Image (cartoon, rainbow, N blue to C red):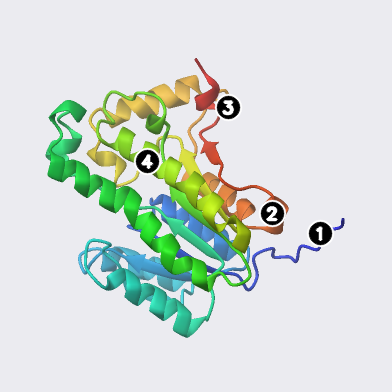
Amino acid sequence: MKIEVPRPVLKGSKALVVGVANEHSIAYGCARAFRELGADLAITYLNEKARPHVEPLARDLQAPIFLPLDVSTEGQLEAVFEAVDKQWGRLDILVHSIAFAPKEDLQGGLINCSADGFAKAMDVSCHSFVRMARLAAPLMTQGGTMFAMSYYGANKVIPTYSVMGPVKAALESSCRYLAYELGGKGIRVHAISPGPLKTRAASGLKDFDLLLTEAAQRAPLGELVDIMDVGFTCAYLATPYARRLSGETLYVDGGVNIMA
């Protein structure tokens, strides 16, 4: 069967990207890639402190929807999806690229992680994606693609990753279950697992520079990935070219994950 794919291949698609903090964010790489391929964007920012860093990026990307979103603040998530529904009446792409754990729980090792810290990390980094999926699914009337950002530490022990390892493992499992539950509606769900990148979120990890150095040394391609590598991977997966892929955890890490 011949697949008719327009160029630019995402022209007319509506994409909501959550997690842009600055020009180094993985979410920003996704937004740029979607826009380059013709998608219209909705972009969120965490709070007023973050807004000056994100607003110029949203403006450059000609995002008609630009709203605050702290998933811990009651009502904000619903307000974003209400705005998407009002502006577009549908949604084709969702990117969840947010994670959080209290610093003392992140840097103290899993065995010392408090119950409150674990719950907070799980809520922001994992369950918020489930809540987003619940709100996004009714808007994906023509099918769609959802993405959540994971990391290699979900499946193998990264000593400094601590509580985020179990949390990201739960996120990857959630992606598989959502792919199953939403597949009948033509909605595909993927976990994306980038190699280490110099993002604001990563700066909270202990000895992060060592992870970067090791990744570059171990990668079969011999170099680190960047945010556009992640963005264009997501853009490809959102096109009809990837119409039969769902529930995958895709590594965008230069091949580091294959190494013993």
Q: Which residue is mark 1?
A: 3
- x, y percentage for residue 203? 26, 40
Tags 1 and 4 touching, CB below 8 Å: no
Within 10 angstroms of label 1, few (less than 14), some, or many (20 or more) residues? few
Tags 1 and 2 touching, CB below 8 Å: yes
Q: Amino acid at mark 1?
A: Ile
Please say whether residue 81 is visible from this viewpoint.
yes
* Secondary structure found at label 1: loop
Q: Nearer the viewer, residue 27 or 173?
A: 173
Q: Which residue is mark 4?
A: 170
Give the mark, 1 or 2, whose residue is nearer the N terminus: 1
> At x 49% / y 47%, what residue is drawn?
177
Q: CA distance from mark 2 to mark 3?
A: 27 Å
- x, y percentage for residue 6? 75, 66
User: How many numbered circles are shown?
Assistant: 4
Q: Using the image, determine if residue 215 lies above or below residue 251.
A: above
Q: Nearer the viewer, mark 3 or mark 1?
A: 1
Q: Amino acid at mark 4?
A: Ala
- x, y percentage for residue 240? 70, 58
Tags 3 and 1 touching, CB below 8 Å: no
- x, y percentage for residue 54? 34, 65
Picture quarter containing residue 155? Answer: top left
Q: Which residue is mark 2?
A: 243
* Secondary structure found at label 2: loop
